[in-house]
Amino acid sequence: MSMLDYRDQGSAATSMKPVAALVYTLEALHRASAVTAEVDRPWQTYLDTITHPNGEFGPAHVAEVKRLWESLRQDLGYRLPLPLTQPTNDGSIQLAWDAGRFYVEIDVRPSGELEWFFRDRVSNELAGTEDDAISELSPELLHKLSLVLPA
């Protein structure tokens, strides 16, 4: 029987279709690498939905939130979990991390200034800026945020 005869019969040995397991493995690797590289895509999409004209926040305000996120990822690495993100009553956008014992929130004002709050639920330690805004990330805030990183 010639090679052509096997192809005509749809033999797996000469089929031009890739083996299903190989296709699945290659697709899974692609998905894994895409997920790793773009783990914040759903969060970024959410930020786009709260931006004018359909959302309540101006593009410059949302850009400040995105800039803050990139700064945090550079300073703390890519292990920083995505924050719970929501609007506040005073027009800020709040980013919050709840890691059981530790809780950190950062409010990004429309001006780009930040307010932050930290709580250690075991020691009852509290820290933050209260109502005093800061214009850049402080070493103390970065240290408190490092406490919410996964082990």
Image (cartoon, helix red, strand yellow):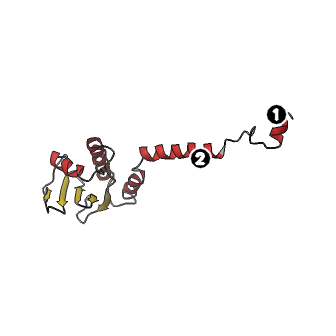
Which disc, if any, is residue 118?
A: none
Horizontal arrangement in the rendering, residue 11 relative to residue 91 (left or right): right
Q: In the rendered structure, which amino acid carries the disc numbered 2?
A: Tyr
* Residue in the picture at 80% in, 39% down: 7
Q: Residue 15 versus residue 36: which sits nearer the camera?
A: 15
In the depicted structure, whether residue 144 falls above or below residue 119: above
In the depicted structure, whether residue 84 falls above or below residue 25: below
Horizontal arrangement in the rendering, residue 34 relative to residue 65 (left or right): right
Q: Secondary structure at mark 2?
A: helix
Give the quadrant of residue 58.
bottom left
**x and y percent of residue 27 in the render?**
56, 45
The 10 Å Cα crowd at callout 1, few under 14, some 14 to 19, many 20 or more, is: few
Seen as rendered, the residue at the extreme front is 1
* Residue in the picture at 78% in, 42% down: 11
Q: Quadrant of the N terminus?
A: top right
Q: Secondary structure at mark 1?
A: helix
**x and y percent of residue 140 in the render?**
15, 48
**x and y percent of residue 51 in the render?**
36, 56
Q: Residue 7 versus residue 31: which sits nearer the camera?
A: 7
* Residue in the picture at 39% in, 52% down: 44
Which disc, if any, is residue 3?
A: 1
Seen as rendered, the residue at the extreme top is 2
Horizontal arrangement in the rendering, residue 8 relative to residue 131 (left or right): right
**x and y percent of residue 8 in the render?**
83, 41
In 3D space, how far apart are the residues under numbered discs 1 and 2 (Cα atoms)?
A: 27 Å
Q: Earlier in the sequence, mark 1 or mark 2?
A: 1
**Where is mark 2, residue-wise?**
24
Q: Residue 57 versus residue 99: which sits nearer the camera?
A: 99
The 10 Å Cα crowd at callout 2, few under 14, some 14 to 19, many 20 or more, is: few
Give the quadrant of residue 100.
bottom left
Q: In the rendered structure, which amino acid carries the disc numbered 1?
A: Met
